[in-house]
Image (cartoon, rainbow, N blue to C red):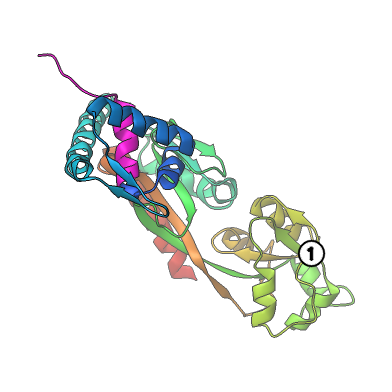
Amino acid sequence: MSFRLPPLNALRVFEAAGRHLSFTRAAEELNVTQAAVSHQIKTLETWLRTPLFKRLNRALMLTEPGQRYLPNVRDALETLESATNGVLQAEENNTLTISVLPSFAAKWLVPRLHRFREQRPDIDVRISATDHYIDFNKDDVDLALRFGDGVWPSWNVERLMTQDFFPVCSPRLANEGPHPLKVPADLKHHTLLHEEAVQSWRMWLMAAGLDDIDSSRGPWFSHALFVIQAACDSQGVALGGTPLVDDDLAAGRLVKPFDLTLPSAWAYYFVCPKPAAARPSIVAFRDWLMVEAERDNAQH
């Protein structure tokens, strides 16, 4: 049988653009330029000899043929993806590649990973530490642990744990020297440590009723991992977040000098492609993660 089919990549682009009704959002999802999306749509429309979108001034709409075509294309792509994953699962060698934020890997995941290996010695785990969001269609990654709002409609997403922010410092900095940290106002005598991607000191100081402390002063670091290490080394006071500082607090390397805690609107999430969510090795790792997260949540 000879199949008369348009280019597969053009169909993928059409499905994303039709789902979002936006070339820009489709380009972001597929990690290509808007011009590339427009080119693929034009290729498909030329192949079909019919327009699929109405391009308005501030909106994008599907034409009647486009509306009929979109659900069929989506079903076909999902069927193809499911069949492909079925072959991959059959050939699975029980190796999991996990994309995770460097700070979360170092301060939470890696210290607990030995317990998963004890439970499932048949599954080899490979940690890929990166700040970049993952494109499961291109990157050789099975699942990801990410910090965000949890709105990733293309993937299977499950919340792992929330995060709270509060000042932390070394016991020596908190209790010794000319200005021990007894009340939040004592922070004016201390160096504030900052993570570049998080500007929460201003919010915490406002919540504490302190408007006479410059929330931007002090050194800035690219990762929370460096901020926490600087705090452990008595270089200043960090705005730590659970679960990244939990082990250092438990070990006495850090202390929490004040009770005031701010909840974050974001959380840590387990993320994987929807068709891969039922893979036995991914299910095993996901279940272990949830048990570990629940144990930590119960301690807060």
Q: Does the magenta segment cover residue 16?
A: yes
Query: Farthest residue in the bottom direction?
Result: 209
Report the amino acid beneath label 1.
Answer: Gly
Q: Which image quadrant is residue 291 in? A: bottom left
Residue at label 1? 236
Magenta portion: prevailing SS class: helix
Element type where label 1 sits in the image: loop
Closer to the camera, 73 or 79? 73
Classify residue 60 as left or right of residue 216: left
Residue 199 vertical position relative to residue 180 in the rendered view, above or below? above
Q: Is residue 256 left or right of residue 280?
A: right
Residue 53 spot, x, y in % from top left: 30, 43
Task: Identify the residue at image location x=69%, y=55%.
Answer: 196
Q: Residue 194 location in percent, x, y? A: 72, 60
**Residue 143 visible in rendering:** yes
Nearer the observer, 278 or 248: 278
Q: Is residue 163 above or below residue 48?
A: below
Question: Is 38 on the left-hand or right-hand side of 49?
Answer: right
Quarter in which the N terminus is drawn: top left
Q: Residue at 79% x, 77% y: name it.
A: 213
Q: Position of residue 254 (x, y in %)?
A: 68, 64
The answer to whether residue 141 shows anywhere in this view is: no
Give the extent of the magenta segment: 1-18
Residue drawn at (49%, 36%) of the image: 33
